[in-house]
Amino acid sequence: MGDEMIKRFIQELRYARKVTHENIIRIHDIIPLGRSYAISMEYFPSHTLADELQGERPINIKRGIKIIFDVCRGISVAHQLNIVHRDLKPLNILINDQSMVKVVDFGVAAVTNNSGTRLTRVGTLLGTPAYVAPEQVRSRAIDARTDIYSLGVVMYEVFTGRPPYTGDDMSILFQHVEGNLTRPIDVNSNIPPALDAIIRKAMSVDPDKRFHNVDELRKSLVDLSRQLS
């Protein structure tokens, strides 16, 4: 990473410090240590959502909805500041013993302007292949809907017990772009049709066909929860 990229990276981390919400791990400071930097952040004793998915079994529907709902609450605040996380995945979702949920690792977050253009260099894929959106693979402009796609992938894994696409990294990236998704309900027949539709909408290859924002996704989850009550 060159000096200019490091400068941009630090600039965006400092901007990410503005994100304050109970469902977000707070970044306190960026500390220079010679030619490297350390990030001090909120301490939160917890385990990750990835830990809960290790058995490759789906999570209870109501519990899973609550987890995703809380993630949406936190991410919504970041999006209001034009900050896109762009690496949402189970490893970055923390849960404590009281079922409090917090999103961590805004280290690859991107500040976007109102047109969706990211401030970091185009052409650099930042994120985890299993969870990146098609527009990230194609090095196109990103916005809040990029995080919604990643959340869709997380939901798929939460409610089916397995990721939507498998293989080596290049194969997975290709599958994200192609979008030949096996319906979640075909993997786990216990998934309500409305939840199946929510997941598939969030994972639409075309950003315009996804939820427009995480608040819209969250409302769909609230409506579903009422149906399940």
Image (cartoon, rainbow, N blue to C red):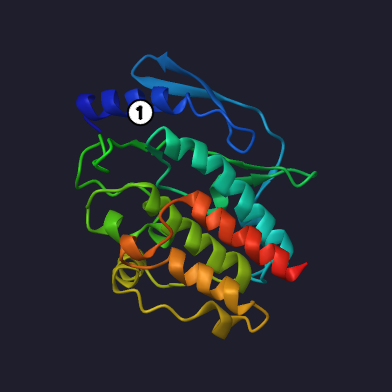
**Mark 1, other Cα within 10 Å: few <14 / some 14–19 / many ≥20:** many
Say whether residue 197 is left or right of residue 168: right
Q: Nearer the viewer, residue 183 or 221?
A: 221
Q: Amino acid at mark 1?
A: Glu
Task: Assign the N terminus to one quadrant of the image.
Answer: top left
Q: Is residue 58 left or right of residue 3?
A: right
Q: Residue at x 43, y 48 (%)?
A: 87
> Residue at image x 53%, y 60%?
154
Q: Is residue 216 above or below residue 193?
A: above
Residue 109: in sight, yes or no? no
Q: Is residue 83 visible?
A: yes
Q: Quadrant of residue 66?
A: bottom right
Up the image or down, 88 lies above or below 121; here it is: below
Residue 194: % across, % down: 58, 74
Residue 176, compared with residue 112, is above or below; it is below
Q: Nearer the viewer, residue 202 or 55?
A: 202
Q: Which residue is mark 1?
A: 12
Where residue 124 sits in the image (x, y, percent)? Answer: 24, 46
- What residue lies at 46% left-to-right and 22% top-to-bottom? 38
Q: Quadrant of the C terminus?
A: bottom right
Q: Quadrant of residue 206?
A: bottom left
Regarding mark 1 in the picture, which secondary structure is present there?
Answer: helix
- In the picture, measured across the screen, residue 96 lies left or right of residue 3, that is right
| Rendering coords of residue 152 (x, y %) | 49, 62
Please tell me which residue is depicted at 25% across the width and 36% down the height of the picture: 120
